[in-house]
Image (cartoon, rainbow, N blue to C red):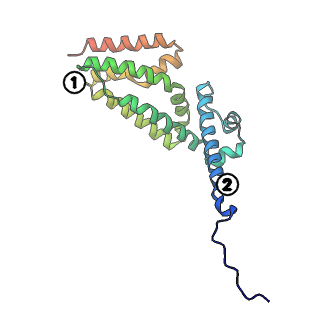
Amino acid sequence: MRTDTATPSTTPSITDATSDLPIDGRRQRSHSSRAKIVQALLDLVEGGTISPNAAEVAESAGVGLRSVFRHFDDMDSLYREMSDGIEAKVLPMMLKPLEATNWKGRIRELTERRVSVFEAILPFRISASIKRHQSEFLMQSYKRMLRVERQGVEALLPEAVLADPAQANAVLAPLSFQTWRLLRHDQELPIATARTVVLRLVEAVLAQSPD
């Protein structure tokens, strides 16, 4: 009869050595599925489906409907992800320092920049605007972007213009997203025509403003 006790091996087993791999694999698949779902929403909106439902997002992403709600509690949280991504992309462009040396030159420079930015985000802002009345987050995001847009213009205006609310708002109006949406979406003007309209509106206001 053996009385010696086997010494436990200190060499990690194959199971121990690879125990993290299945977890890492699941995480990678989870991140991949989540990214596909968000991208599907972006693709649908950019492609003209302004208010896609969960089933449409799932089909476009190539995942099951359950997978959509496994990653997102509801469509609001998915739209939140979209809104966060768009805002993160746009804000640095909108807040980038301008190079012109006088305020009118900076306003002209800002006009060109906003035309490009607003056109790039047009379908996403329209989509979010449809949902914002049902989402506190999207409503707050909308109001925050309005403040950023307004403050970006007001920071360039001289005191003489700021002192005249009508004149200040005359500068603000053509530089708003709402104006771009009116021209491009509601009136269905081509980009070049809408850009010309905005530039002419801005020039007309600047011509009436002090240097």
Between residues 25 and 77, which one lies in front from this camera angle?
A: 25
Q: Quadrant of residue 105?
A: top left
CA neighbours of label 2 inside 10 A, class few (<14), some (14 to 19), many (20+): few
Locate the C terminus by quadrant: top left
Q: Position of residue 115 (x, y in %)?
A: 43, 19
Q: Position of residue 161 (x, y in %)?
A: 23, 22
Q: Vertical placement of 109 versus 142: above or below?
A: above
Q: Is residue 206 left or right of residue 143?
A: left
Q: Is residue 121 left or right of residue 174?
A: right
Q: Quadrant of residue 17?
A: bottom right
Q: Amino acid at mark 1?
A: Pro
Between residues 145 and 187, which one lies in front from this camera angle?
A: 145
Q: Position of residue 187 (x, y in %)?
A: 52, 15
Between residues 160 and 97, which one lies in front from this camera angle?
A: 97
Secondary structure of the residue carrying numbered label 1? loop
**Residue drawn 71% across the image and 86% down it:** 4
**Residue drawn 49% across the image and 33% down it:** 86
Q: Is residue 176 left or right of residue 160?
A: right
Q: Amino acid at mark 2?
A: Pro
According to the image, label 2 marks what residue?
22
- Residue 170 visible in rendering: no
According to the image, label 1 marks what residue?
158
Which numbered disc, 2 or 1, marks the residue that appears first in the sequence?
2
Q: Is residue 91 left or right of residue 69?
A: left
**Residue drawn 49% across the image and 39% down it:** 84
- Residue 204 visible in rendering: yes
Marks 2 and 1 sit apart, C-alpha to C-alpha, by: 61 Å
Q: Position of residue 1 (x, y in %)?
A: 80, 89
**Residue drawn 60% across the image and 40% down it:** 35
